[in-house]
Image (cartoon, rainbow, N blue to C red):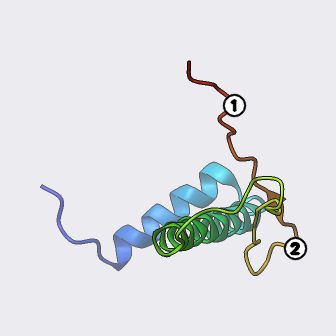
Amino acid sequence: MFGRLGAPEIILILVVVVLLFGAKKLPDMARSLGKSARILKSEAKAMRSEGQDNASAPADPPADTQAPRTIKAAPGDVTARPVSEPSDRTTQH
């Protein structure tokens, strides 16, 4: 049903996108899409490294000596956000 996209089809799609969003908003949209992709990539990398750290670490240090964890920012982002970890304060009887 759908064949391969050739040059005329791609040009038509680009013209429709420019008409829908306007030429002024396209750079902002591309910038925010790139920033979101960088954040997603850094989050995935942090989760992978956390999984490897948990597998190789024998035991966690006590909670009072452990420094708050942060997720490092992407190359274009200058902020680091602290990660709030859930605490299990329930007692078993």
Q: Is residue 67 left or right of residue 55?
A: right
Mark nearest the camera among 1 and 2 is 1
The amino acid type found where label 2 is placed reads Val
Q: Residue at x 76, y 53 (%)?
A: 63
Q: Which label sits on residue 89?
A: 1
Q: Quadrant of residue 39?
A: bottom right
Residue 79 image offset from top left, x and y in percent:
87, 67
Circle number at residue 6: none
The quarter in which the C terminus is drawn is: top right
- In which quadrant of the rendered view does residue 11 lie? bottom left
Looking at the image, residue 44 lies above or below residue 63: below
Q: Position of residue 54 (x, y in %)?
A: 52, 66
State the residue at coordinates (72%, 62%): 32
> What amino acid is found at the position of numbered circle 1 in the picture?
Arg
- Kindly identify the residue that appears in the image at 57 percent across and 64 percent down: 59
**Vertical comparison of 7 with 34: above or below:** below
Which residue matches tag 2? 78
Q: SS class of the residue under badge 2?
A: loop
Residue 81 occupies which quadrant of the picture? bottom right
Q: Nearer the viewer, residue 45 or 35?
A: 45
